[in-house]
Structure formats: structure tokens, C-alpha cells
Amino acid sequence: MIGPAIAVACIALGAGLAVGIGAIGPAIGEGYVAGKAVEAMSRQPEAEGSLRTTMILGQAITESTGIYSLAIALILIFWMGIPLVEKLLELLS
């Protein structure tokens, strides 16, 4: 009876860690890219349009890694976690 409870707890912990750790990288990367883009725009104002386009494209690609970690967390919760919770509730009743 304790097996499903531990499995549910591990799935919840894994989902939380996936989103938490998966958000650190994109946040650091996007902040660094934005800072360097502003620095480059201040040095060369005439290149602002192409720099902005490149910055937005780079940030969109960087953000996709955060979305992948969210997808992994949702898979853990809904595909693996809900059947275990149902089994746990069945055992408890």
C-alpha cells in the first residue's frame, strides 16, 4: 500500500524539479541575450532592426527548452501520476 504513495510523491517531486530546473537555463539565457542586444544597439543604433529580429528569434529558440521541461512535467503528472493516484485511492477504500 505504501508503494503507490511513494510513486505519486516521486512523480510530483520529479515534475516540480523538471519545471524548476528547466526554467533556470532559459531565464539566464534570455537575460544574457537581451542584455547583449541592448549593448550592441547602443553601440550601433543603425543596426537596431536586424539586432532586434535576431534577438527575438534567439529568445524564442531558448524558450523552447523551458516549454520542453513543462511538457515533461505534464507527462509525468497526467500520464503516469493520475493512474497511480487512482490505484492509491482504490487501495485506501
Image (cartoon, helix red, strand yellow):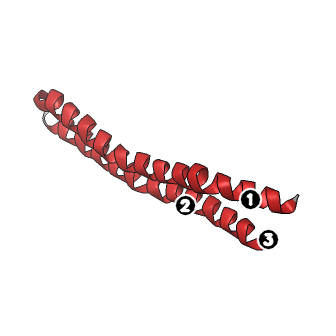
Give the structural element (helix, strand or loop) at label 3.
loop
On residue 1, which mark appears?
A: 3
The residue sitting at the right extreme is 93
In this picture, residue 41 sits left or right of residue 81: left
Query: Which class describes the residues within 10 Å of circle 1: few (<14), some (14-19), or many (20+)?
Result: some
Query: Which class describes the residues within 10 Å of circle 2: few (<14), some (14-19), or many (20+)?
Result: some
In the displayed structure, would residue 92 be above or below residue 6? above
Looking at the rendered structure, the kind of residue marked 3 is Met
Question: Alpha carbon of mark 2 to alpha carbon of mark 3: how far?
Answer: 25 Å
Rendered residue at 12%/35% (across/down)? 44
User: Which of the pair 21/68 is nearer the observer?
Assistant: 68
Report which residue position mark 2 lands on.
Answer: 17
Choose mark 2 or mark 3, whichever is in front.
3
On residue 87, which mark appears?
A: 1
Query: Which class describes the residues within 10 Å of circle 3: few (<14), some (14-19), or many (20+)?
Result: few
Looking at the rendered structure, the kind of residue marked 1 is Lys
